[in-house]
Image (tube, helix red, strand yellow):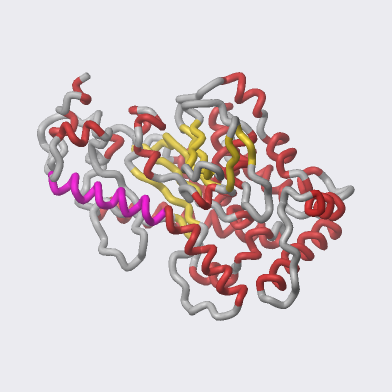
């Protein structure tokens, strides 16, 4: 049987995406052990998830081993080091925490204003580049000139980064199969409006992908983006923002924190809802084959639920997310905390969560009535007439016979 095709989707969350880095490391270690069982065909990411996705993709393109090392080296250098950097980090985090709690006034300054830029330069003067220069740190760990020399890269895994066009309002995706990935693409996906100025690309300007797809999910199933051979059987989601809250937020800081979580999940849940609806209709044999062929849809894809209370369906698998106990310890301000204790803890928790996911995912697939050869990525490779689901006609459609 062909290997199971996996698309990785990495949600944004600032420094908390150190959790994502740990999870990706564990998944890559598992993939090297289980190379005959599955392969990564695409990676998407937004904001901090885009950083992790790009670093991992670059290592894949260069054939590096271990493939996760470059990503982990980035996070080590991005972490506060020494007493001065830790003091600056604590000052920034606690100042924002006091402001959000309503205990300290703040000036509403544009990140593009000379005053804001002067303040940031003053605070980080004399500090190493890895702590004070985000763009420089990215360019140190990723040779974007080399990527430009490659041109578009349709090779798997395909990289997809989410951002938002500030002026047009359109959702944007930068895809390695269509164009060389630039440092501006990563910066655009990370450009939180009240922290970073909009990133100009061409004649447009872009903000954080939080306003777009956080992370891109639906587009991972489109041949126009990832290529016919890279349609995944499963989407493995690494989730940062918690879905539920065990208490009603009352304090100003709690309200800001919960609002940020809800905003960060809106587009994700919409995409998962669309895919679930399509999966249900396909399994119910609701479409004419020529209609599905029009939208390049051939079979269901395994996806996580949006909510834990949703009814379990044959194509549901878990996602990788923080345990509830850890979620309760984190807040909005923690998304800018680069303290070594915080980053180390999040990375370790990501590794553990990925290992839990792999066990739970295997159990879910084993218990499912949807066979491993009946998912989207395997639709073109199935042979014979023993399909218990109404999928045979998809491979017999005009597009499949071309």
Nearest the camera: 112 or 97?
112
Q: Is residue 280 magenta?
A: yes
Work out which quarter of the rendered image holds the C terminus and state it.
top left
Depth check: 34 or 334 in front?
334
Left or right of 84? Residue 357 is left
Left or right, 363 with reference to 264: left
Q: Main secondary structure of the magenta part?
A: helix
Answer above or below: position of 176 versus 315: above
Q: Is residue 364 magenta?
A: no
Pick the residue in front: 224 or 394.
Answer: 224
Q: Which residues are magenta?
A: 268-285
Q: Residue at x 61, y 76 (%)?
A: 252
**Residue 294 in view, yes or no:** yes
The vertical placement of 113 against 165, above or below, is below
- Does 158 appear above or below 119? above
Residue 28 seen from this side = no
| Residue at position x 82%, y 62% in the image | 87
The percent coordinates of residue 28 (x first, y second) are 51, 42
Q: Position of residue 380 (x, y in %)?
A: 24, 29
Residue 102, percent from left and from top? 68, 76
Determine which quarter of the picture holds residue 255: bottom right
Residue shown at the point (74%, 67%) measured from the top left: 106
């Amino acid at each position: 049987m062909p290997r199971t095709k996996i698309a990785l989707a990495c949600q944004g969350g600032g420094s908390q995406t150190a959790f994502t880095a740990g999870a990706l490391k564990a998944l890559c270690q598992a993939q090297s052990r289980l190379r005959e069982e599955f392969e990564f065909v695409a990676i998407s990411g937004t904001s901090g998830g885009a950083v992790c996705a790009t670093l991992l993709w670059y290592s894949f393109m260069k054939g590096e081993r271990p493939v996760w090392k470059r990503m982990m080296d980035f996070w080590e250098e991005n972490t506060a080091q020494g007493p001065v950097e830790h003091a600056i980090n604590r000052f920034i985090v606690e100042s924002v925490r006091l402001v959000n709690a309503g205990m300290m006034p703040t000036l509403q300054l544009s990140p593009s204003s000379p005053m804001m830029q002067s303040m940031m330069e003053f605070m980080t003067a004399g500090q190493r580049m890895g702590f004070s220069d985000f763009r420089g740190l990215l360019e140190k760990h990723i040779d974007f000139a080399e990527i430009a020399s490659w041109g578009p890269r349709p090779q798997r895994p395909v990289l997809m980064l989410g951002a938002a066009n500030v002026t047009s309002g359109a959702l944007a995706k930068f895809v390695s199969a269509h164009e060389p990935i630039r440092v501006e693409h990563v910066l655009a996906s990370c450009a939180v409006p009240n922290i970073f100025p909009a990133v100009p690309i061409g004649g447009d300007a872009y903000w954080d992908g939080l306003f777009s797809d956080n992370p891109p999910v639906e587009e991972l199933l489109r041949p126009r983006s990832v290529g016919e051979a890279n349609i995944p059987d499963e989407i493995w989601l690494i989730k940062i923002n918690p879905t539920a809250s065990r208490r009603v937020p009352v304090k100003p800081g709690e309200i800001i924190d919960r609002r940020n979580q809800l905003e960060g999940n809106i587009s994700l849940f919409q995409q998962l809802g669309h895919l679930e609806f399509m999966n249900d209709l396909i399994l119910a044999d609701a479409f004419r084959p020529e209609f599905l062929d029009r939208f390049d849809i051939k079979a269901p894809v395994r996806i996580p639920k949006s909510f834990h209370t949703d009814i379990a369906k044959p194509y549901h698998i878990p996602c990788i997310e923080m345990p509830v106990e850890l979620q309760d310890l984190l807040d909005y301000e923690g998304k800018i905390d680069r303290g070594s204790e915080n980053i180390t803890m999040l990375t370790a928790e990501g590794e553990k969560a990925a290992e839990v996911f792999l066990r739970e995912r295997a159990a879910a697939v084993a218990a499912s009535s949807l066979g491993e050869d009946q998912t989207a990525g395997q639709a073109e490779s199935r042979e014979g007439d023993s399909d218990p689901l109404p999928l045979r006609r998809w491979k017999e459609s005009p597009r499949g016979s071309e």
